[in-house]
Amino acid sequence: MRVRVPLPLFYLLLFYMLSYLVNSCPSFFFYCMQRDKKRVDSLIINNNSSHYYLTVHRDSLLKSILFLFLDMNCQAKLLIDIVGSDFPYKKNRFYVFYNILSLLYGGRFFVSCSVSELDKISSVVPLFSAASWYEREIWDMYGIHFDGHPDLRRILTDYGFQGHPLRKDFPLSGFIELYYNERLHSIVYQPVSFIQEYRHFDTLSPWEWIN
């Protein structure tokens, strides 16, 4: 015996099913991510349940982002940006933050992990092609190595640049300067040299002068 469901009732049931799925997403996501304690160090959900802050171990970074990408209750398909930061007083001084958006549910996932100067983290380029330039920029500025990146080269500094600018481990003037030599008709690299009269100057600001 077949039972026919009226069309308005069918749409009503479908609406309630989708509503239940959206509302149960934070609970389901929290449950799945907390099952493996080695994967997630901390998880914070804000009051309106649309922003998720995850701190994961570097070895589980790719697995955690893959879960967000594939899970039906997350569907985090759009990478907004990747940001790096440096905290020199910490053992794992570098932090990498991933901002991923779910267009289907409107949720934002902020995934972060910490690494030291010698550690490597997995590249997410196989999942998000837009991550290529972000990871190259972080590598150029901080020296964080992304394992599995198809083309990890400098993107902001010169190819012959030594070191990483945002590590702040070298003088602001640098060690090497380059200029165009008119005689050689080429770019020349040489050690930085300062004229003596520029070594001594007054640092007082004229706007802060007190009579």
Image (cartoon, rainbow, N blue to C red):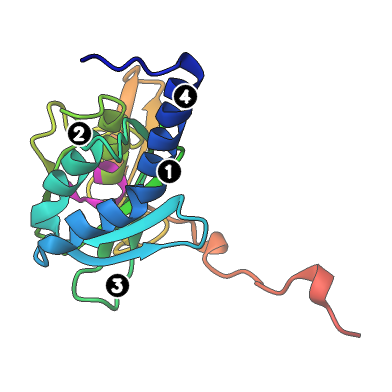
- Expressed as whole percent of the image width and height from the top left, the position of residue 136 reads 26, 36
Are the two marked residues, 1 and 2, in contact with CB atoms closer than 8 angstroms? no
Amino acid type shown at disc 3: Pro
Residue beneath the point at 31% across and 56% down: 27
Residue 88 - label: 3
Q: Is residue 10 left or right of residue 200?
A: left
Q: Which circle's residue, 3 or 2, is located before the other in the chain? A: 2
Q: Residue 149, how many percent across, how many down?
A: 13, 33
- State which mark lies toward you, 4 or 1: 4
Tag 2, which secondary structure?
helix
Pointers 2 and 4 in contact (C-beta within 8 Å): no
Q: Which of these two is toward me, 186 or 78?
A: 78
Q: Which residue is mark 4?
A: 9
* SS at badge 1: loop
From which residue to which does the magenta span run?
139-145
Query: Where 179 sits versus 68, above or below?
Result: above
Question: Between tags 2 and 4, which lies in front?
Answer: 4
In the image, residue 165 lies at what x, y percent?
A: 34, 52
The residue carrying mark 2 is 70
Disc 2 to disc 4, C-alpha distance: 31 Å
> Which one is nearer the viewer's eye here, 140 or 32?
32
How far is mark 3 from mark 2, CA to CA? Answer: 35 Å
Residue 56 in sight in this render: yes
